[in-house]
């Protein structure tokens, strides 16, 4: 058989069903698509449409026997993968087909260093060890844009930012230069500059190795840039597929049209110079010591936040932007007193810096956070109902069971989830749905100040626009104050009253968001905006210096 003329991956009539509690639900319903050698095919659709399940089916990584395939075949190089046993699939995974997962924190081993984890992939699939493995690891980390990779070899996943963890995942997947790379939301956690670099890297590797790519994303801008063909998924079915330009310029299906029309509407909260200050910080510093040697003596500091001052007034949204690792999340955690810091922090007119755990407790109800990684932030042992209601039990114990349940139902409805799902567990939801649960948990307490750490990064375009509208309406209804941390500058532009741009722990530029977006003053901010709004690799590369 001529293997060059046939597709590298040929999926025909594939269905995926899950059996739980005596009931069977169909997650993927008779889908068919092909990927040719050197081709990039994108799977797009809203959260829960079956994109990731389809991808995991290719590598048989679903929870069998709970999962099953009522119909279909998955042929790789003409060989059907579905009948293969686990031992045979191990020979395919890593060498022939690799995958980059959406949530790096759950995919990386928290007990192993970065060098050990990449080294393990090189040893298992390529037989590399010692000096050769170390050199290849450094090469991979450089390729995916990790600065000073030598200093990161001994780091553990928790010591890296969300974006840096994702880069390590990409490095592991590319370690053995597979024929097919499945990328499940690989740029979700990345800032725009690194996003541009990663997309360029994947394009270069495709061109050099003739590697094929199955790219799963909710970001249509990325699809347009990287993919040759696109398959649009909705409710487990492929409703439309074809060349990218054709589908994007002349969509046939109503769902595709709605997906392309979904954009966050720019209607930010106006600056309120006369409103009272909710959160204020002065010369805030968070320095992490670098310890080396037998005695673990401090040889320097990582200056995650280095002398930041800010003030957020009631009803405003402070947007915080910058590259991955610039200190955005650390700043948010320091303001909420979730990590120790130096400098003045004043919340609702009361100094909170230096307060002990018990003394902070009365303030906790009024300050909440939505984390970047919903899977890591939600307890796998608690139902959605218990997760959302937990804060009410702690901070409002006087509420009756019926009142608590009513608040939970309302919060879930507000974030676009069916209240009936509240008795299910986090692992039963898609990445985007888990993020909605995180938002519900934060807003159920009706706080004054909410830190939103990449709250829309895991969401599809349709829900992203809905979430922005939701956050905006909640803000106006309840006079909420937000600190919005994001690498998605389009979303920030639609919400932020004020903007601060961070780089290496310092604020390089700040001001009213509308003015700053129109007229950035520093080269760094200009390059950041260029990378965000044009997805320009050149702009991203300009930032490396």
Image: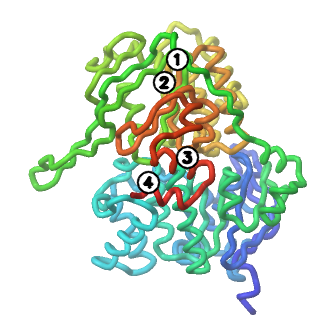
**Residue most extreme to the top:** 398
- Image quarter of residue 460: top right
Q: Is residue 3 above or below residue 526?
A: below
What residue lies at 42% left-to-right and 31% top-to-bottom? 332
What residue lies at 65% left-to-right and 30% top-to-bottom? 422
Q: Secondary structure at mark 1?
A: loop
Instruction: Look at mark 4 in the image and give the residue it sits on.
Output: 165
Alpha carbon distance from label 3 to label 4: 23 Å
Crowd rating for badge 2 (residues with CA inside 10 Å; few <14, some 14–19, many 20+): many
Tell whether label 2 touches label 1 (CB within 8 Å): yes
Alpha carbon distance from label 2 to label 3: 29 Å
Alpha carbon distance from label 3 to label 1: 32 Å
Visible in this render: residue 372?
Answer: yes
Instruction: Look at mark 1 in the image and give the residue it sits on.
Output: 447
Dot placed on the residue nearer the N-terminal end, 2 or 3: 2
Alpha carbon distance from label 1 to label 2: 7 Å
Q: Position of residue 16 (x, y in %)?
A: 74, 58
Dot placed on the residue nearer the N-terminal end, 4 or 1: 4
Dot placed on the residue nearer the N-terminal end, 4 or 2: 4
Instruction: Look at mark 3 in the image and give the residue it sits on.
Output: 529
Dot placed on the residue nearer the N-terminal end, 3 or 4: 4
Q: Secondary structure at mark 4?
A: helix
Q: Secondary structure at mark 3?
A: helix
Instruction: Look at mark 2 in the image and give the residue it sits on.
Output: 368
Tell whether label 4 touches label 3 (CB within 8 Å): no
Q: Position of residue 326 (x, y in %)?
A: 40, 44
Front position among marks 2 and 3:
3
């Amino acid at each position: 058989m001529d293997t060059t003329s046939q597709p590298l991956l040929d999926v025909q009539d594939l269905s995926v069903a899950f059996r739980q509690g005596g009931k069977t639900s169909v997650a993927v319903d008779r889908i068919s698509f092909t990927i040719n050698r050197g081709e990039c095919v994108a799977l797009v659709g809203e959260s829960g449409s079956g994109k990731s399940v389809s991808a995991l089916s290719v590598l048989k990584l679903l929870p069998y026997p709970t999962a099953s395939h009522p119909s279909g075949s998955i042929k790789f190089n003409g060989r059907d993968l579905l009948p293969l046993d686990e031992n045979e699939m191990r020979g395919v995974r890593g060498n022939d087909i690799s995958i980059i997962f959406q949530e790096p924190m759950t995919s990386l081993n928290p007990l192993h260093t970065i060098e050990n984890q990449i080294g393990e992939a090189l040893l298992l699939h390529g037989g590399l060890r010692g000096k050769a493995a170390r050199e290849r690891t450094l090469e991979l980390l450089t390729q995916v844009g990790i600065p000073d990779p030598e200093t990161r070899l001994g780091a553990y996943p928790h010591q890296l930012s969300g974006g840096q963890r994702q880069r390590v995942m990409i490095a592991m997947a590319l370690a053995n230069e597979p024929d097919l790379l499945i990328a499940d939301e690989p740029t979700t956690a990345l800032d725009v500059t690194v996003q541009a670099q990663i997309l360029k890297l994947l394009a270069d590797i495709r061109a050099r190795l003739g590697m094929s790519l199955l790219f799963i994303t909710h970001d249509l801008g990325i699809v347009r840039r990287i993919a040759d063909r696109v398959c649009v998924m909705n409710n487990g079915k492929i409703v439309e597929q074809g060349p990218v330009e054709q589908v994007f310029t002349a969509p046939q299906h109503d769902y595709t049209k709605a997906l392309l029309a979904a954009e966050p509407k720019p209607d930010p909260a106006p600056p309120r110079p006369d409103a009272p200050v909710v959160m204020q910080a002065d010369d805030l510093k968070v320095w992490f010591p670098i310890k080396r040697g037998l005695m673990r003596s401090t040889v320097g500091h990582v200056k995650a936040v280095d002398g930041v001052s800010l003030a957020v007034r009631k009803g405003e949204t402070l947007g915080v932007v910058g590259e991955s690792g610039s200190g955005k999340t650390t700043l948010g955690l320091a303001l909420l007193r979730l990590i120790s810091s130096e400098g003045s922090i004043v919340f609702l007119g009361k100094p909170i810096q230096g307060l002990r755990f018990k003394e902070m407790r009365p303030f906790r109800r009024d300050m909440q956070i939505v984390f970047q990684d919903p899977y890591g932030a939600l307890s796998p042992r608690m139902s959605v109902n218990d997760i959302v209601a937990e804060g009410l039990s702690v901070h409002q114990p006087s509420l009756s069971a019926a009142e608590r349940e009513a608040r939970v139902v309302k919060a879930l409805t507000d974030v676009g989830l069916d209240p009936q799902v509240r008795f299910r567990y986090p692992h039963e939801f898609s990445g985007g749905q888990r993020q909605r649960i995180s938002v519900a948990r934060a807003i159920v307490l009706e706080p004054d100040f909410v830190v939103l750490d990449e709250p829309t990064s895991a969401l599809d375009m349709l829900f992203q626009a809905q979430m922005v509208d939701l956050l905006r309406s909640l803000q106006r209804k309840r006079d909420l104050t937000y600190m919005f941390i994001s690498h998605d500058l389009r979303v920030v532009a639609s919400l932020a009253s004020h903007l601060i741009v961070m780089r290496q722990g310092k604020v390089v530029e700040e001001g009213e968001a509308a003015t700053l977006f129109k007229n950035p003053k520093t080269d760094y901010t200009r390059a950041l905006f260029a990378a965000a709004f044009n997805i320009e690799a050149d702009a991203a590369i300009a930032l490396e210096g």
